[in-house]
Image (cartoon, rainbow, N blue to C red):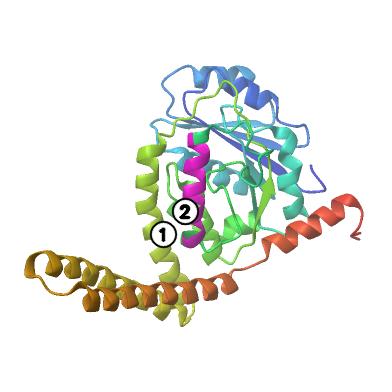
Amino acid sequence: MYSKHKIGVVIPALNEELLIKRAVDAIPDYVDKIYIIDDGSTDKTLDVIKEVVTDRATILVHTTNRGVGAAIVTGYKQALKDGIEIVAVLAGDNQMDPKHLPRLLDPIVWNFADYTKGNRLVGEEMRRNMPIWRYFGNSLLTYITKAASGFYKTCDPQNGYSAISDRALKALNLDDIYPRYGYCNDLLAKLNVAGCRVTDVMIPAKYADEKSKIKYGRYIVKMSYLLTKTFIWRLYTKYVVFDFHPLIFFYIGGAILMSLGSMGMLYSFYAKLFLHTPLFVNGVLSIILIMSGIQSFAFAIMFDMREQHGDSASAYSTLNGIRSGRIKIK
């Protein structure tokens, strides 16, 4: 146990025969249960897992590849059945250093968060070993995910190194979580709608022998589409179905105004080139519509941020105070 809490670790694995042993062997002794999910591997991953398995480890097998998100959900469900109070996720490629696990567990143990995740983008020291292309992709997806999830103070949403409380897991519809890469972005939106508190934890990037299975060019395009749907789902579910908030009108109004302004701008150039009409009047009106739409979006985002549950910065500041001894807990 860790601070009187039962801890579980979920390790999704797909064709990780070379690195899965290192990942399992590095799990600290205070972890009560390890859930290793073989997600339809076609190499010797399952054989290696069986060789290194211990009494505290449970092997769960997907006969076909269902996606990393689905593998993690399988681990989450089994952890809930076993009465685990906090469940962490570590990669099967040994990319996530278990020595940082207490940094993820502490905010949940001390009831400052329901879900914690790693953040490698907060400073040069944290992201020193991160490839440039991966840093660019993560940064771009960070801003898209902020809007989609409603957690505007979170960064590095692609970081799968995380921990979640059993309370949060019980508040979620686990079967509704996106099953493949992108599950962590989708999960943030689900946590927001469920009213859960999310906190980032600074953890340095670690890259060695593993090779990322993500192709960032296609992945960013695919994720942008997914997060647009997630954004619409979150707004509708949280601000229409569960409650009502006028920010919906600001978002809808902003979208309409920006669309009209953009179409007006295109027509203005068409009219100038082919109909020889003056560009100034139509162009100015289009710009006014676009700027009004941007202003409407800004108001909507401001209201959305105020509705966010929890204050990650405040919670993290308090947590650091406890660690340094400036703040005492009973």
Residue 300 at x, y = what percent?
Answer: 47, 75
Name the image quarter holding residue 162: top right
| Left or right side of 72 for 3 | right
- Cα separation, mark 2 vs mark 1, equals 7 Å
| Left or right side of 237 for 261 | left
Residue 166 at x, y = what percent?
Answer: 64, 54
Residue 162 appears in the figure = yes
Q: Nearer the viewer, residue 267 or 272?
A: 272
Name the image quarter holding residue 220: top left
Residue 50 at x, y = what percent?
Answer: 58, 20
Q: Residue at x 78, y 36 (%)?
A: 30
Residue 84 appears in the figure = no
| Left or right side of 82 for 67 | left
In magenta, the rendered stretch is: 133-147
Query: Label 1 is placed on what type of residue?
Result: Thr
Residue placed under numbered mark 1 in the picture: 230
Q: Residue at x 46, y 60 (%)?
A: 148
Say whether marks 2 and 1 touch (CB < 8 Å): yes
Disc number placed over residue 322 in the picture, else none = none
* Relative height, residue 130 to residue 105 (above, below): above
Residue placed under numbered mark 2 in the picture: 186
Q: Residue at x 34, y 53 (%)?
A: 225
Q: Nearer the viewer, residue 294 or 327?
A: 294
